[in-house]
Image: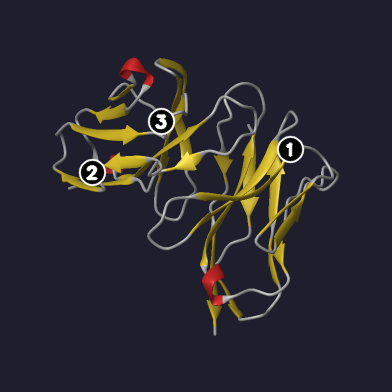
Amino acid sequence: DTGVSQDPRHKITKRGQNVTFRCDPISEHNRLYWYRQTLGQGPEFLTYFQNEAQLEKSRLLSDRFSAERPKGSFSTLEIQRTEQGDSAMYLCASSLTVQNTEAFFGQGTRLTVV
Amino acid sequence: GDSVTQMEGPVTLSEEAFLTINCTYTATGYPSLFWYVQYPGEGLQLLLKATKADDKGSNKGFEATYRKETTSFHLEKGSVQVSDSAVYFCALSPGGATNKLIFGTGTLLAVQP
């Protein structure tokens, strides 16, 4: 297993365009998390899935953001009508369903909105 | 709400120096505490964790003790190496079912030969 992979690694888009990111978790992990990290800050929780069910969403996740995890495998995060404030690193992590277990992070997708 | 405060960086040390990175937290329940590390060009990796008061997490020569009375989880290493240069994040998991993490802002450590 190569760990958590995210695609693309970098994305530059014009304001107002839609973008979609993909995350492939470690295969046996049934939990998947999305975080956002801006420059000089730590990652901030956005949402998480238990298998295909989205169980929690942060208030940071506005109506322009939507995440899916069909069939409980890979996940996508879509941002509609991007704004400059959406520029950030978007991180995906996966874990087993065990309390306090380690979360494994991908290298992230860096989004720049121009 | 729950939060984590870390000492600001960058921290610059010479090889073999002693390292301390301070971390304090605010939480309403009984959180678990973590240190994650991000080496250049890589994703976040768990360095160590502690799940209850007075627990000590340790890994690769790094240690941190969960101090409930001071709400702290300071990271220490007795002798740093150039290869320890990275960004270190303190984090808490509030407990309950989600295992979501609340991170501090990160501390950049630069170790010079």
Picture quadrant of residue B13: bottom right
Return the x and y of residue A113 as percentages of the image width and height: 21, 45
Q: Secondary structure at mark 2?
A: loop
Tell me the residue that label 3 is attached to: A27
How many marks overall? 3
Q: Is residue A47 left or right of residue B57?
A: left
Up-down: is B66 above or below B94?
Answer: below
Q: Amino acid at mark 1?
A: Thr
The residue pinned by badge 2 equals A8
**Residue A58 appears in view:** no
User: Image check: A14 left or right of A10?
Assistant: left
Which numbered mark, 1 or 3, is in the foreground of this view? 3
- Mark 3 belongs to which subunit? A
Chain assignment, label 2: A
Between residues B83 and B53, which one lies in front from this camera angle?
Answer: B83
Q: Residues within 10 Å of mark 2 (few under 14, many from 20)?
A: some
The residue that mark 1 highlights is B51
Labels 2, 3: front one: 3
Task: Give the image location of residue B37, x and y in percent.
Answer: 54, 55
Tell me the distance, in whole angstroms, between the alpha carbons under discs 1 and 3.
26 Å
